Image (cartoon, helix red, strand yellow):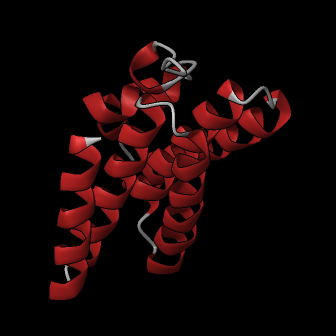
Amino acid sequence: VEQSAALDALHREADRLGFKYLSLASAIERAEALLYAGDFAQARQALERATAQSEKLGLRTLRAKAEYLLAAERRLAGNASEAARHGSEARRLLNEIAKEAQSDLFLKRADLVAILQDSPSPGGTAPSKN
């Protein structure tokens, strides 16, 4: 909860200063913290907002991460079909970026490997529902 509050403060300050990428990245990290804390409803809401905003801004890497986390949240909520759809979209976005860059090096980034491997949840382990 403490990490979530700190990330929320960072998100708000970055947003206030007009740092769109940092604002969105911190919002996604906050949603991931909420997911790990077991607050699936708030995590989902934050991720849906982040997905829409990243699409609007054209920030495909952040959108892929948000889609991946939505897949994890949906999987944990027992909705396998929505989880598969979000996971597929995350991988599609990353493959599209790599194709445009004409390099697979992009796909070897540590923060993107889990998305491509389609781990069941962030970090590869399911958050508890404490």
- Relative side of 74 to 79, left or right: left
- Counting every numbered tag in the picture gives 0
The residue at 50%/31% (across/down) is 38
Specify the quadrant of the image occupied by residue 129.
Answer: top right
Q: Estimate the x, y position of residue 63 in percent, counting from the top left.
A: 49, 57
Residue at the extreme top of the image, as rendered = 125
Residue 65 vertical position relative to residue 63 in the rendered view, above or below? above
The residue at 27%/61% (across/down) is 8
Quadrant of the drawing holding the N terminus? top left
**Residue 93 in sight:** no
Residue at the extreme right of the image, as rendered = 81
Residue 62 vertical position relative to residue 2 in the rendered view, above or below? below
- Relative side of 109 to 74, left or right: left
Specify the quadrant of the image occupied by residue 10.
Answer: bottom left
Q: Estimate the x, y position of residue 106 in percent, counting from the top left.
A: 32, 40
The residue at 25%/80% (across/down) is 15
The residue at 44%/27% (across/down) is 122
Q: Estimate the x, y position of residue 19 in percent, counting from the top left.
A: 19, 79
- Relative side of 94 to 12, left or right: right
Q: Estimate the x, y position of residue 114 in percent, counting from the top left.
A: 43, 24
- Relative side of 54 to 123, left or right: right
**Residue 113 in sight:** yes
95 and 91: which is toward the camera: 91
